[in-house]
Image: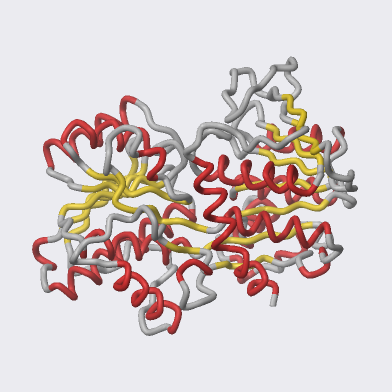
Amino acid sequence: MKRRIIALTLAAVMAFSLAACGSGSGNDAAGTTESAGETGSESESAPEETAEEGNEAAETTEAADTAATDMNIAMITDSGDITDQSFNQTTYEACKSWAEQNGAQFTYYKPDSDSDEARNASVDQAVAGGANVIVMPGYMFAAAIVSQSELYPDVKFVALDVGAGDICEKGVGEGYDYNPANYDVTEYYNTDNVYCCTYQEEISGYMAGYAAVKLGYKHLGFLGGMSVPAVTRFGYGYVQGIDAAAKELGIEGEVEVEYVCGGQFYGDADITAAMDTWYGTKGVEVVFACGGGIFTSAVEAAVKVDGKVIGVDSDQAPVIDQSGEGLTVTSAMKGLAATVNTVLTDIKDGKWGEYAGKIDNLGMVSENPEENFVQLPIGSTQWGDGFTEDDYRALVKSLYSGEVKVSNDITAMPSTSVKVTDYGSVK
């Protein structure tokens, strides 16, 4: 029932939040007071006016025209920024918007380094600041769930993209065999005050790869961030979709895939150089850039040769296409904003008991694409004769019914008829 309730708000919330990702500004509300700073040592550019306040992180939003509530929400970035046009920003904007609309207090925090200790310190800081609900996007927060959920039993933790395997790895420590089925995950954290969910990224990756081949692209690339489970599910799903479409068209021998991870979640000169080689020397036509800000390297290389890019997590066309009209073929999305919106609403309504201790795997819940937690953006996908919106809707129906199956196995690259070259990692 809970998943169905979340699904009912998915289309509207994704449309609102994902459109905001490319706006470059926050969502203003009448009578709203805002301030911002950060825990890290580097200056952070937020999507609205900010004012630094020493080393104290954050942005606090309080809607003056709404009655005060008991909710004090904190959102902590994994290690990136709220301007990454991807995972952190989508989560941040969803939390901020919900707080403004519901009269709750909201603060975001950025850890001062990429470490479990720094993320735990941000949790400490959030609790010291009065937070009683903490939203944490990404697997990197598994250690915080293990240690901080026990330390702060009165705080509700909402962890996006954190699964049983992530928690077991941190809870078990040395000797963990990377098979969470061999462990009782509930032994490693406080199930009374934690809700976790993961997403079936392999499905949206599949849809993106399938669409690209149907639209005529034959030399495709995948640029991941770090080779963590979520990124790998996106990538392996993408490869499966490419292979399926090539088989349907009878062009397996003509389709080729280049596959690499950058080893980080941001673009730089080294990764751009690798993409220059793909687009320029190898003749890659489109790259699925999957991993926070790493898409910037794919975009920088693509614009030089009129190449194309596939976005991730949110509809990235409004951002990517600022570098060149029509750069974005589509985006492999997941419903982060819908999850945040519904869970926070249910916490406000006293329904935390429906979430506490659960680890949901969110994906297909309907034949209607807009209701699913994994989807392509209907408004910005570059439909063509080879793959129309009707074709997409038919594919979604086949995926939902189980007629088309996508493997979520990430232990090895999927077996394919098309040629796939895996370069490992740039760094």
- The image shows residue 50 at horizontal and vertical percentages of 66, 22
Q: Where's the C terminus, which quadrant?
A: top left
In the image, residue 94 above or below residue 13: above
- Closer to the camera, 367 or 30? 30
- The image shows residue 75 at horizontal and vertical percentages of 70, 41
Count of labels in the image = 0
- Closer to the camera, 398 or 113? 398
Q: Residue at x 32, y 37 (%)?
A: 426
Coloring applied to the structure: secondary structure
Q: Residue at x 25, y 64 (%)?
A: 242
Q: Residue at x 64, y 72 (%)?
A: 3
- The image shows residue 31 at horizontal and vertical percentages of 78, 33
Quadrant of res 100 = top right
In the image, residue 372 above or below residue 258: below
- The image shows residue 358 at horizontal and vertical percentages of 72, 67
Is 379 on the left or on the right of 71, as rendered? left
- Closer to the camera, 145 or 134? 134
Is 192 on the left or on the right of 373, as rendered? right
Q: Where's the N terminus, which quadrant?
A: bottom right
Quadrant of res 67 = top right
